[in-house]
């Protein structure tokens, strides 16, 4: 495999969500290293650094939890693609997502529905809306899920379930699209040093903090897996070990272990 700087990056346009911070921001930075000047469109509530409504670094302001806002954003993305190269594969990165920490029976139902809207429905809408042009030009849909996709996750139950959906959905779409020029891959990071934990009301300490990856590490592993044509990648050696373990142990035991670990992440 060539060095990171020499990785193949055949995409002529990039669309991603949640590029203003965290893993999304690092993905933009590393993509620009691989292909300087490639048109990139970011969809998020906050403007990504160096992006605007007019530049090749295009910012589309959108509330991904709102279906009407998503419809308008998809129209803007299609217009952005029409302005750029008429041919060449497109990379769609469904990166935005969030969670909320706490027992489900004590939580706000509206917050749980918002998690589903952002982590699932927004991805379905954006992928569906761009599928015709993806089929026409070819490309890859990269969905950023989580290691929580591999086991039940007490205290972040809805979040974990949405990530499990993404992993299975990605594999199913990859199979359905196997005779086309569109591929689907899923990225499954573990604990990462991003604003995610603050928004979710979680603290990262002890062994969890020692094993946490940086957004740069996750982004680089994701782009290497993309170049290799992987169906999914779990980033970080410790995460690879834990997810493998979760697939062979009984679900009851895995749930108790997961609940034990997550119960210590409650913010005091």
Image: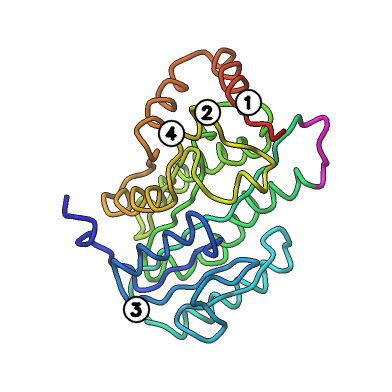
- Looking at the image, tell me whether mark 2 or mark 1 is earlier in sequence order: 2
Numbered disc 2: secondary structure = loop
Residues at marks 2 and 1, CA–CA distance in whole angstroms? 9 Å
- State the mark number for residue 37: 3
Q: Position of residue 3 (x, y in %)?
A: 18, 55
Magenta stretch bounds: 104-110
Mark closer to the observer (2, 4): 2
Q: Position of residue 194 (x, y in %)?
A: 54, 50
Say few, some or many: other residues with alpha carbon within 10 Å of mark 1 (under 14 / 14 to 19 / 20 or more): some
- Image height of 142 relative to 165, above or below: below
Asked whether 152 or 6 is in front, the reply is: 6
- Looking at the image, tell me whether mark 3 or mark 1 is earlier in sequence order: 3
- State the mark number for residue 211: 4
The quadrant holding residue 223 is bottom left
Residue 19 lies in the magenta stretch: no
- Looking at the image, tell me whether mark 2 or mark 4 is earlier in sequence order: 2
Q: Position of residue 25 (x, y in %)?
A: 47, 62
Residues at marks 2 and 4, CA–CA distance in whole angstroms? 9 Å
Residues at marks 4 and 1, CA–CA distance in whole angstroms? 15 Å
Q: Which residue is mark 2?
A: 206
Numbered disc 4: secondary structure = helix
Residue at image location 38% in from the left, 70% down from the top = 137
Instruction: Judge left or right: residue 60 versus residue 233.
Output: right
- Image height of 173 relative to 206, above or below: below
Main SS category, magenta section: helix
- Looking at the image, tell me whether mark 2 or mark 3 is earlier in sequence order: 3
- Looking at the image, tell me whether mark 3 or mark 4 is earlier in sequence order: 3
Q: Which residue is mark 1?
A: 264
């Amino acid at each position: 495999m060539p060095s990171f700087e020499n990785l193949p990056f055949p995409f002529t346009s990039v669309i991603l969500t949640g590029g203003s911070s965290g893993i999304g921001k690092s993905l933009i930075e590393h993509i620009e290293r691989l292909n300087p000047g490639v048109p990139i469109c970011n969809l998020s509530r906050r403007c990504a650094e160096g992006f605007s409504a007019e530049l090749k670094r295009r910012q589309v302001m959108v509330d991904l939890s709102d279906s009407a806002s998503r419809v308008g954003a998809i129209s803007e993305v299609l217009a952005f693609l029409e302005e750029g190269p008429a041919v060449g594969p497109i990379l769609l990165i469904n990166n935005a997502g969030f969670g909320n920490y706490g027992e489900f029976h004590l939580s706000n139902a509206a917050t749980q529905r918002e998690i589903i809207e952002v982590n699932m429905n927004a991805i379905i809408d954006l992928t569906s809306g761009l599928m015709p042009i993806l089929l026409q030009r070819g490309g890859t849909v990269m969905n950023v899920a989580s290691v929580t996709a591999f086991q039940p996750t007490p205290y972040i139950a809805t979040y974990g379930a949405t990530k499990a959906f993404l992993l299975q959905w990605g594999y199913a779409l990859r199979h359905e699209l196997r005779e086309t020029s569109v591929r689907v891959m899923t990225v499954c990071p573990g604990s990462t040093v991003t604003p995610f934990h603050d928004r979710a009301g979680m603290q990262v300490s002890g062994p969890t903090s020692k094993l946490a990856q940086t957004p740069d590490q996750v982004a680089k592993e994701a782009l290497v897996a993309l170049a290799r044509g992987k169906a999914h990648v779990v980033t970080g050696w410790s995460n690879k070990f834990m997810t493998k373990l979760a697939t062979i142990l009984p679900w009851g035991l895995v749930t108790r272990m997961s609940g034990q670990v997550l119960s210590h992440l409650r913010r005091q």
